Amino acid sequence: MARINALATAIPELDFEQDYRRWALLQLEGQREAKLYERMADRSGIEHRWSVLSAQDARLHQGEGLYGGPDAPGTAQRMQIYATAAPELALKAIAKLPDLGRITHIVVSSCTGFVAPGVDQIIARRLGLADDVERVLIGFMGCYAAVTALRTARHIVRSEAEARVLVVTVELSTLHHQQEIDIEPLLAGAQFGDGAAAAIVSASGAGLELHSGIAAALEDSADLITWDIIDTGFKMRLSGDVPNRIAAAIARPEVRAAITGGLDVSQIDAWAIHAGGRSILDAVENGLELARGSLEDSRAVLRECGNMSSSTLMFVLERIMKHQPARGVALAFGPGLAMEGLHFGWTGGD
């Protein structure tokens, strides 16, 4: 069976949470929504978010640069930043892993940028990996792509017992904040930060064993989360109805059974829920009738880093690995609206 032997995470140096709040309030100045924004930001459960930009480059106080203004850079310039910063942040996470051993495959997930040669090739070269390393790049799937990356690694290991897979997620969401005058997109932007994670998946040794997958797509929900490429980066739409739709979906008996594997929720030791926002975590906790505190690892990641798209779930799993749970469930939500997940449990190794 495939298992995560090691997992490490990395964040950039700039904590821009408070600056973003001040900037967003400037966009709403004179509107009655300003006080609503401030109240909702205070209740978000987010205290820190991190960006690969420097404070000067971000120009947060002036509302210029990547955050709008007459000289806001286009998509090409943002992708130039991604091409340099994404591999650097990914390598920062990889450097925290123990001895990599002989890596046979790389699976990279990222939805916040494009570059060719890809981040996977750049990483392989920088690490000095063998020329015959096999690569998979998972792009533009959004927040649930970490599940897809781990499931892909699981399939590789189950088909090639000697495989040793390096799984990487890297997201630079802060390259794409847009100057807006409406509260909904500003609140959506208030969720996102940058982060990267790296994991080793193999068929031997101790770690989180990866079991069966979970997948569900919600009907009539394609417009709830969208991610469009425009002239000034990628523009996200995150509907406020997402938590209610998630709660309704997981209340369905067949979806609940798929999530729990037919077990009672009390029999599951760990819940790795994508920290997409406080309201999403509340929807999952209430919808599955989980005990208070069941999602503390997810809430801690949200508090300390915000939503880092596909990397977020990896940050949660890093915390959960320390508990060595016998049974666990990982779930993430993203464009579609779709839910992706997998079951897992700690193994002491062979």
Image: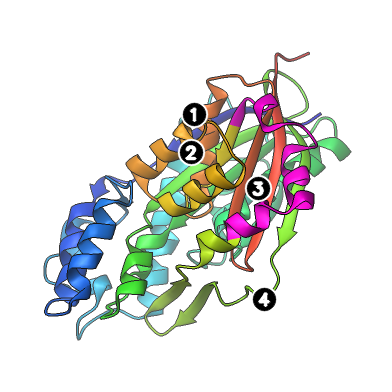
Region in magenta: 246-270
Assess whether mark 2 and mark 1 are in contact (beta carbons under 8 angstroms).
Answer: yes
Q: How is the image coloured?
A: rainbow
Mark 4 or 3: the one toward you? 4
Q: Secondary structure at mark 2?
A: helix
Q: Does the rendering let one see residue 335?
A: yes
Question: The disc labelled 4 sits on which kind of residue?
Answer: Asp
Q: Earlier in the sequence, mark 4 or mark 1?
A: 4
Assess whether mark 3 and mark 4 are in contact (beta carbons under 8 angstroms).
Answer: no
The Cα–Cα distance between marks 1 and 2, rounded to whole angstroms, is 7 Å
Question: Residue 325: x and y, percent?
Answer: 63, 21
Mark 3: give few (<14), some (14-19) or many (20+) Cα within 10 Å: many
Q: Earlier in the sequence, mark 2 or mark 4?
A: 4
In terms of image quadrants, where is residue 53?
A: bottom left
Q: What mark, if any, has residue 147 been given in the picture? A: 3
Q: Does the rendering let one see residue 102?
A: no
Residue at mark 1: 319
Residue at mark 4: 220
Question: The disc labelled 3 sits on which kind of residue?
Answer: Val
Question: Residue 266: x and y, percent?
Answer: 65, 27
Residue at mark 2: 315
Mark 2 or 4: the one toward you? 4
Q: Earlier in the sequence, mark 3 or mark 2?
A: 3
Mark 4 or 1: the one toward you? 4
Q: Secondary structure at mark 1?
A: helix
In terms of image quadrants, where is residue 336?
A: bottom right
- How would you classify the magenta stretch by its main secondary structure? helix
